[in-house]
Image (cartoon, grey):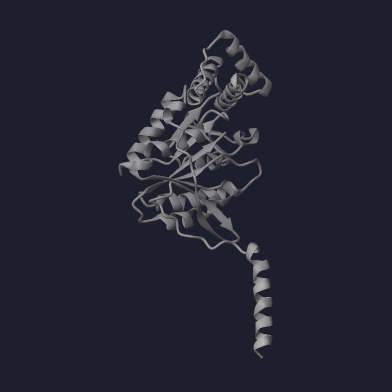
Amino acid sequence: MDSRLNVFLDRADHILARLDPLLPAIPVPVDWSATLAARWQREGRNGHLQPLKVSLDLNLDDLIGVDNQREQLARNTRQFVNGLPANHVLLWGARGTGKSSMIRALLAAHAEQGLRLIEIERDHLADLPRVVECIVGLPQRFVVFCDDLSFESGEGDYRVLKSVLDGSLERAPDNVLLYATSNRRHLVPERESDNENWSRVDGELHPSEAVEDKIALSDRFGLWLSFYPFTQDHYLAVVRHWIEVLARDAGLEWEWSDELAILAVRWASGRGNRNGRCAYQFARQWVGKALLETAP
């Protein structure tokens, strides 16, 4: 009898060993005293907060040429961290202009004051009430961050999201704010047909219901910050800043020149982008090449 039981237990252990990698990991409660950021991880109908290892090497001063946007967002976040009234924020505009970087730089600026970051994907925003439940009553201040919040033409998800945001944001505890980035101010594409039914009443223009419906989603954010494509001077200023930072960290001696500026402009022209991301990529390429050429 004992031998048959041992055979059964051995087979059971073997089966469990094969099944174990297929089973979802048991979520561990996040220790927010030691964790600065987490990501909402959806698993089937459930989800949990997955701790992230983040780098705090990006500073707000590294974001060049967006002084007004940086100051408004920093002031709103300081109000939030200090327990004062603050707004949910929508950062919208051209890609690669520092929207996401600015939010992550805030973590470095205020982590010691208790600021924490939670990333959530657009498709998981319906879980926002669950996320809020995980952090309600905690002493830290949480920015729930959704990157690239936008919807394509024909998608009806934005109406569901609007209802979720209505309920979640209005009843959210005072230690939670939502910061989102988007390439569109109104998050949903606007079509020419949406504007066909505008009406004039006593000399005032009234938008159609379609337009009102789409604008209403972005109205959930109290603060809108606009980011515009870089001019060439702005782009070159960002290139120069990042070369200076990278070269200083690597101990590389260098100096700015017209030739270097021409190379940076050509780099941007070849990619069809003149923005902060492109400037950072060129700086890494140029500094790396210079270090390689000077290596013994």
Image quarter hosting the N terminus: bottom right
Q: Residue placed at 57% from the left, 29% from the top?
A: 96
Image quarter hosting the C terminus: top right
Q: Residue placed at 35% from the left, 45% from the top?
A: 114
Q: Residue placed at 66% from the left, 44% from the top?
A: 154
Q: Residue furthest bottom?
A: 1
Q: Residue furthest top?
A: 258
Residue 258 coordinates in the image, percent (x, y): 57, 8
The image quarter containing residue 60 is: top left
Residue 198 coordinates in the image, percent (x, y): 56, 34
Q: Is residue 157 above or below residue 55?
A: below
Residue 118 coordinates in the image, percent (x, y): 47, 47
Residue 271 coordinates in the image, percent (x, y): 67, 24
Give the side of residue 14 with respect to residue 126, left or right. right
Give the side of residue 157 with respect to residue 30, left or right. right
Along the viewing direction, whichever of 295 and 190 lies nearer the viewer: 295
Q: Is residue 290 above or below residue 55?
A: above
The image quarter containing residue 69 is: top left
Q: Residue placed at 43% from the left, 31% from the top?
A: 59
Give the side of residue 135 with respect to residue 282, left or right. left
